[in-house]
């Protein structure tokens, strides 16, 4: 059997139509297949490869750590320098009140830990989240997700979950003294890059403080420089009680974290002891890669490059079929008139060597979220290909091809 046949036979599939690209290697912003076929990665492995693929500093850090030790003991039991160095570095980049880190394996796990911490600290049960929000696929994270289509087949899920419409100030009054926590994205990613109206996050923060509910920001997609600042929350100045990071945090390796004050995090140490544990959370290789990634992000000044790159995409992506280009740094949604047109665009772009994607709750929008290292010439080439693919898709839809 060839690779594709093995893939379809032995690996569990997530959809009936996987891309099934055979990837031999990856470097910079490119994925390479057989015969040096290559695709420009415009989605960063869904917000993971923020520094591109195979950055030398990350590769070196992983190799050096692998020569020292891999897994030693369940997270939190032994003193391990990769975890300590990463925690110290990470906290130096965060608001003062976010000074204690619990490392896990993924964003879903970080959300689960954050929800448990909120319930334990407040003694309350209700969780408030938002329509069209995505926080992961585990049952707890799915419970607060914003799409019944993705949830209905797996009910019953967590009870006492209230869903609000993102950006609607009048609905914030539904957050009450029963609410343990509100879980929100600073920008709704899978809804198609939906930004909150001015003052909304501040009003959300005030309402949580007024009723004693904890505020959890999930920055799995917007964190680690994606917006042009290390955290998306820096654009509003609103500080949560608990912060979730994942995806790009690991520099290409699996890593997530939920972060709070030391006082708050202490709630997981008693009643019961081991209130939250993780076997592989904070794996030494992942922590070494993450530390290298954070240092590269700072030393190479990549965040300062984001606004100019964002503006270049806006200047170049002009076409009658484009309804809107919404962006939060280099997290962008190209809105088209239909999901059919978007899928055709994705297919035509892939044939021309550009890998893109759609959004879970906005399948009529093209996802553009390239590695932060993308250069001006590469942006120009990517936009040219996307416009050619869009024109071909429009012609095919009109029956002209």
Image (spheres, rainbow, N blue to C red):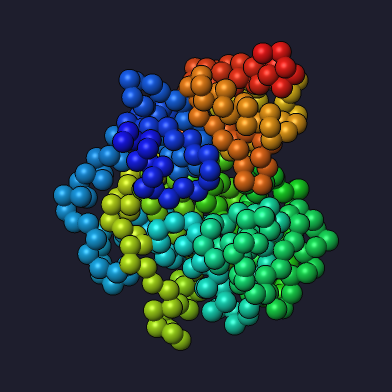
| Image point (40%, 23%), residue name | 38
Residue 350 visible? The answer is yes
Nearest the viewer among 234 and 189 is 189
Nearest the viewer among 326 and 140 is 140
Residue 117 on image: x %, y %: 52, 73
Residue 64 on image: x %, y %: 20, 46
Nearest the viewer among 94 and 131 is 131
**Placement of the N terminus among the 4 image quadrants:** top left
Nearest the viewer among 6 and 185 is 6
In the image, taking residue 197 as reference, residue 306 lies left or right, namely: left
Find residue 332 and report its image quarter.
top right
Q: Residue furthest top?
A: 400
**Placement of the C terminus among the 4 image quadrants:** top right
Residue 120 on image: x %, y %: 54, 79
| Image point (52%, 51%), residue name | 220
Find residue 208 and report its image quarter.
bottom right
State whether residue 193 is above or below residue 280: above
Residue 250 visible? The answer is no
Residue 354 on image: x %, y %: 50, 25
| Image point (70%, 78%), residue name | 178
| Image point (36%, 27%), residue name | 33
State whether residue 234 is above or below residue 206: above
In the image, taking residue 183 as reference, residue 2 lies left or right, namely: left
Q: Residue furthest left?
A: 67
Q: Residue furthest bottom?
A: 271
In the image, taking residue 308 as reference, residue 394 lies left or right, namely: right
């Amino acid at each position: 059997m060839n690779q594709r046949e093995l893939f379809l036979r032995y690996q569990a599939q997530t959809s009936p139509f996987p891309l099934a690209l055979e990837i031999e290697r990856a470097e910079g912003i490119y994925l390479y297949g057989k015969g040096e076929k290559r695709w420009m990665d415009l989605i960063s492995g869904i917000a993971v490869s923020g520094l591109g693929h195979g950055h030398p500093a990350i590769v070196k850090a992983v190799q050096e750590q692998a020569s020292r030790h891999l897994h030693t003991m369940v997270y939190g039991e032994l003193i391990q320098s990769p975890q300590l160095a990463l925690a110290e570095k990470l906290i130096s980049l965060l608001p003062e009140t976010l000074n204690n880190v619990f490392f896990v394996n993924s964003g879903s796990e970080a959300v689960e830990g954050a929800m448990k911490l909120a319930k334990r600290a407040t003694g309350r049960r209700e969780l408030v989240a938002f329509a069209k929000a995505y926080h992961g696929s585990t049952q707890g994270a799915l419970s607060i997700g914003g799409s019944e289509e993705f949830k209905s087949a797996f009910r019953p899920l967590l009870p006492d979950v209230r869903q609000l419409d993102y950006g609607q100030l009048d609905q914030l009054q539904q957050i009450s003294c029963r609410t343990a926590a509100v879980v929100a994205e600073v920008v709704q990613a899978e809804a198609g890059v939906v930004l909150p109206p001015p003052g909304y996050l501040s009003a959300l923060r005030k309402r949580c403080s007024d009723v004693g509910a904890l505020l959890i920001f999930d920055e799995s997609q917007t964190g680690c420089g994606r917006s042009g600042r290390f955290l998306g929350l820096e654009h509003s100045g609103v500080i949560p009680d608990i912060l979730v990071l994942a995806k790009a945090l690991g520099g290409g390796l699996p890593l997530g974290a939920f972060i709070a004050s030391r006082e708050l995090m202490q709630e997981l140490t008693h009643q019961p002891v081991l209130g939250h544990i993780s076997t592989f959370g904070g794996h030494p290789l992942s922590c070494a890669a993450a530390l290298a990634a954070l240092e590269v992000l700072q030393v190479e000044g990549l965040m300062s490059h984001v606004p100019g790159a964002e503006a270049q995409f806006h200047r170049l992506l002009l076409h009658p079929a484009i309804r809107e280009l919404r962006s939060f740094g280099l997290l962008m949604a190209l809105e088209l008139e239909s999901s059919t047109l978007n899928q055709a665009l994705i297919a035509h772009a892939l044939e021309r060597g550009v890998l893109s994607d759609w959004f879970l709750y906005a399948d009529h929008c093209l996802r553009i979220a390239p590695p932060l290292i993308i250069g001006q010439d590469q942006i120009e080439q990517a936009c040219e290909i996307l416009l050619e693919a869009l024109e071909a898709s429009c012609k095919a839809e009109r029956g002209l091809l």
